[in-house]
Image: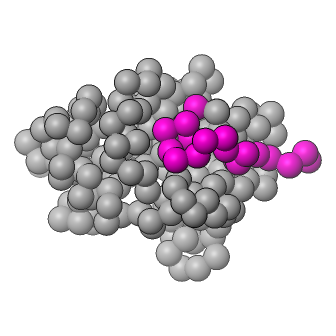
Amino acid sequence: MREEELRFIPFRSCSDKGWAEAWAIYRTSFPQNEQWHEEDYARAFSDPHFEADGIWLGERLAGLLFHWHSDTFRYVEHLALSPRMRGQNLGSRALRAFCQAGGRVILEIDPPEDEISIRRLHFYERLGFAENPYLYIHPSFHEPYLAHRLVLMSYPDAITYDEARRFADFVREVVLRYSGHEKPTLPRLPKP
């Protein structure tokens, strides 16, 4: 039996077909400090660096992939599947398709310190992502702005310190302007 094709369909506004369901998936899939407010995304829709894709399997919304583009990489900010669609290898299929579109892909994960975060690390490694050794401190997306360590993962291979620094600059200068931060100072990479 042939696998049903996944389609990535960009949301252009919070009133688009599937957005309410995607937003419900988002709200239940990520810790509070890693979530944006919906009105922040409404503002980001007009940024040419940003795309919020619904991941569709036929006529069913399977999940979401929110990502940003620079001249040298694509940043996967959030990837989540509907609870009813989990366990079907759809997350792997979606991320593999996204990566195969070409170019450098970077994402952030929690440090591998417990069973869930270690499984998450291995999930990305199986898809060809490399764990990068740089100390990367990221702020939460809204108040209180608590800094937390994340691990940078990159595809198809490891990134240099300069690439990691440019990534941190992009997140701080482009992505976080849609959060509640007025003048973010993080993320930054300390000098090696």
Quarter of the image holding residue 113?
bottom right
For the magenta stretch, what is the residue range?
174-192
Q: Residue at x 24, y 50 (%)?
A: 22
Q: Position of residue 184 (x, y in %)?
A: 67, 44
Q: Position of residue 103 (x, y in %)?
A: 55, 27
- Does residue 72 sit above or below 93 in this rendering? above
Q: Position of residue 70 (x, y in %)?
A: 57, 25
- Does residue 102 sit above or below 87 in this rendering? above
Left-right relation of 166 to 144: right
Left-right relation of 9 to 165: left
- Most extreme residue toward the front is 182
- Most extreme residue toward the right is 192
Examine the residues drawn in magenta and state their main secondary structure. loop
- In the rendered structure, does residue 20 fall within the stretch colored magenta? no
Q: Position of residue 61 (x, y in %)?
A: 17, 48
Can the viewer see residue 181?
yes
Can the viewer see residue 57?
no
Q: Residue at x 56, y 41 (%)?
A: 176
Q: Residue at x 57, y 63 (%)?
A: 144
Quarter of the image holding residue 169?
top right
Tell which of 176 and 152 is nearer to you.
Answer: 176
Q: Residue at x 48, y 25 (%)?
A: 49
- In the rendered structure, does residue 178 fall within the stretch colored magenta? yes
Tell which of 43 and 63 is nearer to you.
Answer: 43
